[in-house]
Image (cartoon, rainbow, N blue to C red):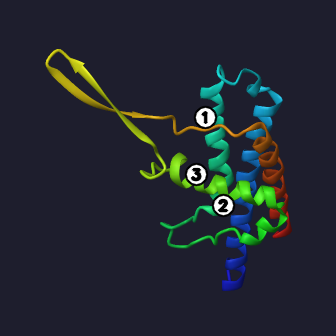
Amino acid sequence: MDRKSDGLLRQFKRVAISFADFKEANDIVSYIKNNKLYAEFEGNFLVLSALTNSMILAYCKPFSGNDSRNQIKVPDLPTTVLKVLSPDELSLHKFLIQLRNQLIAHSDSQAIEMKFAIHTYGDFQMLQPVRNRSSRCLSPEQLDLFESMSLKTALACSYFT
């Protein structure tokens, strides 16, 4: 295969992989909404936070730098895909990237509020770190925006093929 064809094939792979990531994110947000998981928010918090984390990770994959360990790299998705987003969607996109980078995929010490409790057992004291939940759920309004933007970015991938 000549160099140009190889480059085009690698670009096509990135677009196809990104489409699948955006589709997965859209499937998850649709599942949350269709099953009305927010109706029992407290009872469903653990499931909602797990689905939200998965949804955000899937959405952010195309923007997270890829193939860093591969010898033959597939290029990142062009940021021009973001042109399909409204200003509110673009703002949510930036928030989700930050959330992914600081709390979901990593434990950023500046983003995590740590508190400590001292437990006394007789003459023995123990300092225990108490961490607030790093898992978050999006608001219903953010879910609506997310549903729209995940669909738009998936469809935008078809423009690159």
Ranked by sequence position, the earlier of labels 3 and 1 is 1
| Furthest residue toward left | 123
Crowd tier of the residue under label 2, counting other residues whose Cα lies within 10 Å: few below 14, some 14–19, many 20 or above: many
Q: Is residue 96 left or right of residue 159?
A: left
Ranked by sequence position, the earlier of labels 1 and 2 is 1
Crowd tier of the residue under label 1, counting other residues whose Cα lies within 10 Å: few below 14, some 14–19, many 20 or above: some
- Label 2: state its secondary structure: helix
- Label 1: state its secondary structure: helix
Q: Amino acid at mark 2?
A: Pro
Q: Is residue 71 left or right of residue 28?
A: left
The numbered disc on residue 50 is 1
The numbered disc on residue 32 is none
Position of the C terminus, as image quadrant, is bottom right
- Label 3: state its secondary structure: helix
Q: Is residue 134 left or right of residue 10?
A: left
How far apart are labels 3 and 2 at the CA level?
12 Å
Residue 153 percent across, percent down from the top left? 79, 58
Q: Which residue is mark 2?
A: 62
Q: Nearer the viewer, residue 26 or 101?
A: 101
Callouts 3 and 1 close, C-beta under 8 Å: no
Ranked by sequence position, the earlier of labels 3 and 2 is 2
Q: Amino acid at mark 3?
A: Arg
Closer to us: mark 1 or mark 2?
Answer: 1
Q: Which residue is mark 3?
A: 100
How far apart are labels 1 and 2 at the CA level?
20 Å
